[in-house]
Image (cartoon, rainbow, N blue to C red):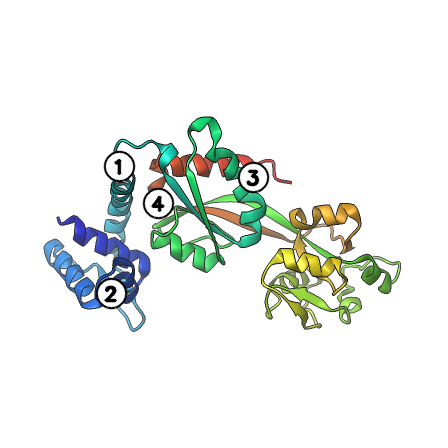
Amino acid sequence: MDLALLRTFVTVHRAGSFTRAAALLGLSQPAVTSQIRTLERQLGRPLFLRQARGVTPTTMGDELAHKAAPHLDALVEIAETGPDNDASLRTLHLAGPPEFTAERALPALTELTGEDGQGFALRASFGNAEEALEGLAAGHHDLAISTARPRGALLTATTLCDEEHVLVAAPHRAEQLGPEKIGPKDAPALDDVPVIEVHESLPFVSRYWASVFDSRPAAPGTVIVPDLRAVLACAIAGAGLAVLPRYLCALALERGEVVPLHEPAIPPLRTYFLVVRTGTLAMPHIARAHEWLHRAAAIWG
């Protein structure tokens, strides 16, 4: 069986379409289609079901991808680094949300890159869960940190950690609400407080309101900025209330730059998953980074 055909097949399986696979491989779409048809003729079985938007693998296609993808990844690794190079010369490609990756994952992995001279080069990219998982499946990343658990057998996810969300504002904003604590049914008391968020859909505030108050926030976003660190800076400046991961605002809480507006008995949590392509933990540098992140997560408060 031609390895070039297998490589094209795995790329189509990961990309979910001939068009995207062609772009990743630097081939024309007709060339990709021809290679997949050739492989299907050799196997005597269809590998994909053609649909209006992309392709869906058949059972045979999923089985072949599960068997072939890890070995093809290992061959690509050898081709890129050479058979005699050790893990210290390999590059780990990591993808994840900007704040969590910058504040937690990268500091932990930076310690590992220089550990006993057996580290690796590190490249990081930021994106949302969908972008990180798509890039991982397409082979652009080795590890992805995601708030969504992937489906299917191509990607393998393990729970990394939970983050607690806190409703905060600058002290003078809290004083405007009065001396009493916001109770479990007191969401209306916050309706007139401006909201700082990362997106117009208010993902953090809406999730908090649904979990704690069993309602939807009434106030629209006053300040929208696509980075939680900037959201914190705006909250400290007094622009309004915000829902933030506790680890991100812990120092600001300690300094009194922001204060909690509400402290529910069970705070809302968000789970992070560490995701790899199935089979790639056989590669030493990916396995070491995977283990190191789990070890670091065990002590993250």
Look at the image and tell me whether residue 286 can be seen: yes
From the top left corner, tell me how far across and down residue 228 is, in percent.
62, 57
Indicate the position of residue 161 as horizontal and vertical percent values. Answer: 56, 44
Number of residues whose C-alpha sits closer than 10 Å to that of mark 2, classed few (under 14), some (14–19) or many (20 or more): few
The amino acid at mark 2 is Leu
Which amino acid type is shown beneath numbered disc 4? Answer: Thr
Q: CA distance from mark 1 to mark 2?
A: 37 Å
Q: Earlier in the sequence, mark 3 or mark 4?
A: 4
Query: Is 84 drawn above or below residue 53 in the view shown?
Result: above
Answer yes or no: do the residues labelled 3 and 2 have beta carbons within 8 Å? no
Q: Nearer the viewer, mark 2 or mark 4?
A: 4
Taking the image as shown, residue 191 lies to the left or right of residue 54, namely: right
> For residue 82, which numbered disc appears in the image?
1
Say which of marks 1 and 3 sits in front. 1
Residue indicated by mark 3: 297
Can you identify the residue that label 2 sits on?
Answer: 49
Nearest to N terminus: mark 1 or mark 2: 2
Q: Nearest to the eye among marks 1 and 2: give it.
A: 1
Q: CA distance from mark 3 to mark 4?
A: 21 Å
Distance of mark 2 from mark 4, alpha carbons? 22 Å
Badge 3: few (under 14), some or many (20 or more) residues near its Cα, within 10 Å? some
Circle 3 sits in a helix, a strand or a loop, which is it? helix
Amino acid carrying mark 1 in the image: Gly
Q: Earlier in the sequence, mark 4 or mark 1?
A: 1
Query: What residue is drawn where x is 54% and y is 54%?
Result: 98
Mark 3 vs mark 2: give the one in front.
Answer: 3
Q: Of helix, strand and loop, which one carries label 1?
A: loop
For the point 12% across and 57% down, the residue is 44
Dot label at residue 278: 4
Indicate the amino acid at tag 3. Ala
Of mark 1 and mark 3, the one earlier in the sequence is 1
